[in-house]
Image: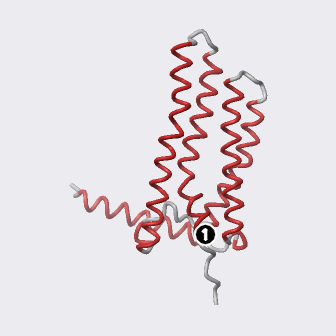
Amino acid sequence: MTSPTGLFDRYQNYRVRRWLVQEQRSAGMLTTWRTRHRRRVLVVTVVIALLGLTVAGLLAALDLGVAPIVVAVAVLLFLPSWTMLRIACGGQDNAPDPMLDEFEIAERNKARSVGLALTQSLTLPPLGYLILAGTFAPQADAYRTAYAGGLLMMAALMAGGCAPAMILGWTRPDPEPES
C-alpha cells in the first residue's frame, strides 16, 4: 500500500514533468506578446469575451433570440485570447511549486485567492436568478431559464478561473531581455 506522502510526491513529480514539457513546447511561441502592454491587451480581450457571455445570459433570460449568436462571438473571442494569455504568461498561474521561487509562489497564491473570492461572489447572482425564477415563476420556460442561468454561471466560473492568469498577466513586469 502506498503512503499518502509517496502518492503526493509522485503526483507533484508528474506535475513538474508535465509543466516542463508544456513550457518547452510553448517557450518560443508568442515572444512579442510577452510584454506587459500586450499581456494587458489580452487580459482586456478575455474580460470583454467574458462580459459577452454575461450579456448573452441576460439576453437569454429576456428571451431574445440573439443570445446564441452573442455566445458564439464571445467564445470565438475567448478561446484564442485566453490561450495566448496563458502562453504569454508562461502558465505560471498553475505552475507547480518547485518551478517557482518564493516571490512567484506568493504572487501566484494571492492571485488564486482573488480568483476564488471572485468565483464565489460572481456565482451568487446567477444562482439567485435560478432560485428566484424557479420559486416565483414556475410557469416560465424551463429551457430559457436553464439556458440563461447556465450561461451566467459559466461566465462567472470562467471569470474566477481565469482571474489568476489575468492578474499575473496584468501585474507582472516585462521579462528580462536575454543577453
Instruction: Quickly name the residue at label 1.
Output: 25
Q: Position of residue 66 (x, y in %)?
A: 78, 29
| Residue extending furthest toward the top | 139
Q: Position of residue 96 (x, y in %)?
A: 43, 65
Q: Residue at x 50, y 34 (%)?
A: 124
Q: Position of residue 135 (x, y in %)?
A: 51, 14
Question: How crowded is the residue under tag 1: few (<14 C-alpha within 10 Å), some, or many (20+)?
Answer: few
The total of numbered circles placed on residues is: 1
Q: In the displayed structure, does residue 81 sit left or right of residue 19?
A: right
Q: Find residue 29 and report its image quarter.
A: bottom right
Q: Residue at x 52, y 37 (%)?
A: 123
Residue 113's place in the image compared with 25, above or below, is above
Q: How is the rendered protein coloured?
A: secondary structure
Q: Which of the image's four quarters has the C terminus?
A: bottom right
Q: Residue at x 40, y 71 (%)?
A: 98
Which residue is at the front of the view, 31 or 145? 145
Amino acid found under the numbered disc labelled 1: Arg
Q: In the displayed structure, does residue 74 sit left or right of residue 3?
A: right
Helix, strand or loop at mark 1: helix
Q: Find residue 68 and report its image quarter.
A: top right
Q: Position of residue 46 (x, y in %)?
A: 67, 52
Q: Which of the image's four quarters has the N terminus?
A: bottom left
Q: In the displayed structure, does residue 3 sit left or right of residue 151?
A: left
Residue 60's place in the image compared with 109, above or below, is above
Q: Residue at x 76, y 42 (%)?
A: 73
| Residue extending furthest toward the bottom | 179
